[in-house]
Image: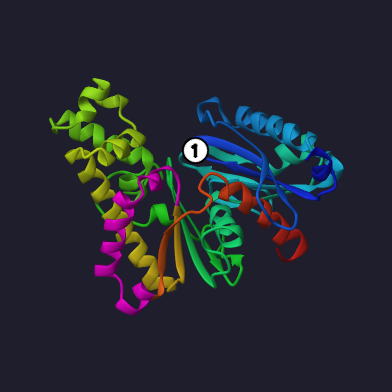
Amino acid sequence: MAERRARTRWIAGVDIGGTNLRVGLVPFAGGRPVAVSSAPTCAARGPAAVVEEVVSMLRMVIAEVGRANVAGVGIGAPGPLDRSRGVVLETPNLGWHDVPLVDMIASPIGLPVILDNDANCFAFGEWWLGAGRGAERLIGVTLGTGIGGGIILGGAPYRGASDAAGEVGHMSVDYSGRRCACGSRGCVEAYASGSAITARAAEGIARGADSALAAAVGDPAGITAEMVCKAAAAGDGFATLMIDETARLIGVAISNLIHLLNPDVVVIGGGVAGAGELLFAPLRDEVKHRAFRSAARACRIVQAERPATAGLVGAAGVFKLTVHGNV
C-alpha cells in the first residue's frame, strides 16, 4: 500500500469547520481520500493556533507519500473570503477577521495553496465524487455549527462578484426574527444550524417543555444538537417537534433557492443532516408545498454521500480545477 501511494500523484485537502478540522490526501485523478485525520477546531484559541494545528496535520499526511508526490493544497474555510489574496475576511462562527490564511499555510508547507469557501468545497466534492455526480446545476447545503451553501453550475463553483455567493445560512426566513451571529435578524442559520437548535431546545426546556432532554443533562445549557436528534429518533415529542420545525425552516430556504436557480439536485450534509428522514421527510414536504411544481419535480433533494470528507475532497478538486482547468 505504501509503495502504491508513493507512485500516485496527490492533492492535500483541508476542511476548516466550526467544530472540526479535517485533512486528507485525494488522488489527483479523483477517488477515495486516504490518510484522513481530524481534530477539534478550538476556535477560541484564535486563528494562529488553529492554523498551526492545520499545518501540523498537513505535514503528517504529506509525509505519508512524500512531498514530491503532492501537487498542492486546497483549503475550504468559512467566509466571506478574498480568494485572490487568500484572505479570510470574516467568519461569524470562528470570530476571524482579515486572516491571510493562504500565506500562513503556504509558507511553512512549501506547496501551492488554493483557498475557497468551505461550503463551495462541500458542494464541489459532492458534485465531483458524491451524491450529485455530474449534475449541471447543484446546490450544496451544510447544516453544521452554522449553515453554509455552495452553488455548482456547469461543473464549476459559482462564487459571485465578491466570492460571497451561496450564503444560504444568511437568507432571512423572518425579517424581524432571531438575531444571527452575522448581525442580521431572521437568518435561517439563527434557527436551523446546530448551535441554533441547541439554543432553541435549551429555551424550550427552560420554559418547562416536557422532554427527556431535561433529565438527560439536568441543565438546559448542556443540551447539544446531536442530543436533540437522538431524542427525536427515540420518539421524544419535544425533540421531534424541534427537528420538524428545523426541517421546515430549511425547506423554506431551499424553496427560495429552487425558484432562483432551478437546480437538478440539492445535496444536504453536516451533522444535523444525520437526523435522516426525521429531517428530510418534512423538509421535502415543505418544498413540495412551496416551490413551483415543475421546479420541485425536477430537483432531487438528497443526503450527502460523503458527509465526513466531501469538504476536503472538494477543496482538493477546486485546487485541481483552478490550477489545471478541469477535474
Highlighted range, magenta: 269-297
**Residue extending furthest toward the top:** 218
The question of residue 134 being in magenta is answered with no
Quadrant where the image shows the C terminus: bottom right
Q: Residue at x 59, y 56 (%)?
A: 125
Q: Position of residue 155 (x, y in %)?
A: 61, 68
Residue occupied by mark 1: 18
Give the quarter of the image for residue 237: top left
Q: Position of residue 212 (x, y in %)?
A: 20, 29
Q: Residue at x 24, y 50 (%)?
A: 244
Q: Position of residue 3 (x, y in %)?
A: 84, 41
The question of residue 289 being in magenta is answered with yes
Foreground of the two, 304 or 151 = 304
Amino acid carrying mark 1 in the image: Gly
- Left or right: residue 23 compared with residue 216: right
Q: Residue at x 49, y 35 (%)?
A: 19
Q: Residue at x 67, y 54 (%)?
A: 31
Judged by its main secondary structure, the magenta piece is: helix
Element at label 1: loop
Quadrant where the image shows the N terminus: top right
Q: Position of residue 43 (x, y in %)?
A: 52, 30
The answer to whether residue 186 is seen in the rendering is: no
Give the quarter of the image for residue 280: bottom left
